């Protein structure tokens, strides 16, 4: 197992941690034939660059990516999603356990579904959840309304780019930024957020 950590790591991390489990040569276990990446924690501004550097350094060409995150930076979530799509990795919602080949259920809220949307195959195991709310800006800007309109436009464009149905953004808009709406599996399938491996 390989891990990328932040020197400022505390009990409640303020950054996305990256853990990786390498494939096992010659194994017949399909789950051990490729890399497994665990992305856990909030999406910070440097997360996409760290993940891209790690993938390049390790020479990872095929991976199952497990996301467990409360959200964080939308820009970072979209950057990671584009990176995962470029690499043609599959995404799941889950977190690492003592047996890294048997992940536990996890949560993917706020900005996290944007990263999850980057997977070519997007899986949602029983017990794991996807949660959404309205896109918002938490950094003071001169014209907050205009800025949020720009961010909303970028978010809509990104979801279309990833092949996600426009209904997802409409559902997000109905949920206040301090709330979370959990998607049912049926809703996620209908919106093409979950595709059970039927990627582009």
Image (spheres, helix red, strand yellow):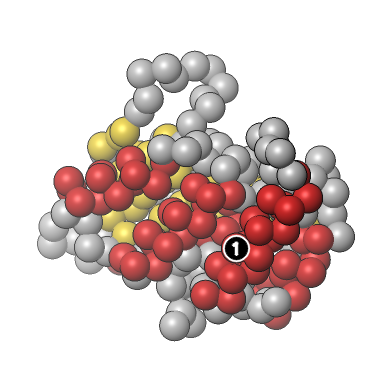
Residue 96: quadrant of the picture: top left
Residue under the point 68% across and 38% down: 141
Quarter of the image with the N terminus is top left
- Is 159 left, or right, of 65 in this rendering? right
Residue 1 shows in the view: yes
Q: Quadrant of residue 152?
A: bottom right
The C terminus, quarter of image: bottom left
Question: From the viewer's perspective, is residue 78 above or below residue 43?
Answer: below
Q: Is residue 129 above or below residue 9?
A: below
Query: Can you identify the residue that label 1 sits on?
Result: 154
Judging depth in this view, the residue of 166 and 140 nearest the camera is 140
Residue in front for this viewpoint, 1 or 176: 176
Q: Using residue 91 as the reference point, say whether residue 153 is left or right of it.
A: right
Which residue in the rendered view is the most extreme toward the front? Answer: 142
Give coordinates of residue 166: x percent, y percent.
70, 77
Question: In the image, 183: left or right of 22?
Answer: right
């Amino acid at each position: 197992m390989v891990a990328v950590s932040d020197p400022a790591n505390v009990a409640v991390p303020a950054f996305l941690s990256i853990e990786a489990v390498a494939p096992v040569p010659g194994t017949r276990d399909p789950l051990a034939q490729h890399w497994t990446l665990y992305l856990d924690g909030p999406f910070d501004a440097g997360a996409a660059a760290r993940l891209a550097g790690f993938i390049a350094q390790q020479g990872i060409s095929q991976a199952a990516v497990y996301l467990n995150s409360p959200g964080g930076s939308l820009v970072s979530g979209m950057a990671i999603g584009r990176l995962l799509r470029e690499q043609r990795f599959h995404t799941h919602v889950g977190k690492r356990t003592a047996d890294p080949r048997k992940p536990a259920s996890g949560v993917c809220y706020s900005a996290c579904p944007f990263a999850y949307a980057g997977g070519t195959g997007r899986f949602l195991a029983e017990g794991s959840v996807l949660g959404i709310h309205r896109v918002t800006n938490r950094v003071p800007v001169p014209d907050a309304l205009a800025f949020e309109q720009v961010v909303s436009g970028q978010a809509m464009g990104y979801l279309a780019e990833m092949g996600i149905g426009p209904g997802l953004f409409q559902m997000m808009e109905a949920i206040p930024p301090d709330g979370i709406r959990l998607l049912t599996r049926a809703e996620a399938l209908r919106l093409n957020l979950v595709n059970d491996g039927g990627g582009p």
